Amino acid sequence: MDSNWLSQLPQPSRQEQRLLAALDEPSPAHRLACQIKLSIELNGLPLAAHP
């Protein structure tokens, strides 16, 4: 994810951080889509789904 998009998102909560830590290869760009409040400012935000 582009760093410009990352700067527009709030920091992940402690719970989200714990869930993301369970990924095989966690990255600072990984976020849980269900934790991001959508707004017009995020129009165009690229998303990728992982199994």
Image: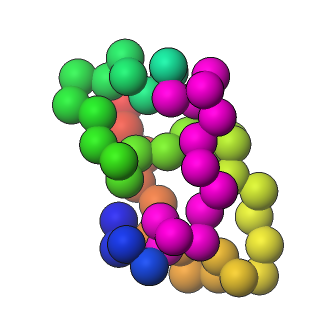
Quadrant showing the N terminus? bottom left
Q: Which residues are magenta?
A: 5-17
Left or right: 24 in relation to 29? left
| Magenta run includes residue 36 | no
Residue 48 place in picture, x, y as percent? 40, 54
Instruction: Look at 51% across and 70% down and name the residue there.
Output: 7
Instruction: Look at 78% across and 73% down and name the residue there.
Output: 39
Quadrant showing the C terminus? top left
Instruction: Look at 35% across and 48% down and name the residue there.
Output: 28
Residue 8 place in picture, x, y as percent? 59, 72
Residue 6 place in picture, x, y as percent? 47, 65
Question: Camera-side residue: 19 or 45?
Answer: 19
Instruction: Look at 50% across and 19% down and name the residue there.
Output: 18
Number of numbered discs overlaid on the protein picture: 0
Residue 30: image quadrant is top left
Residue 32 place in picture, x, y as percent? 56, 40
Task: Residue at the far left: name it.
Answer: 25
Residue 22: image quadrant is top left
Mainly helix, strand or loop, the magenta region? helix
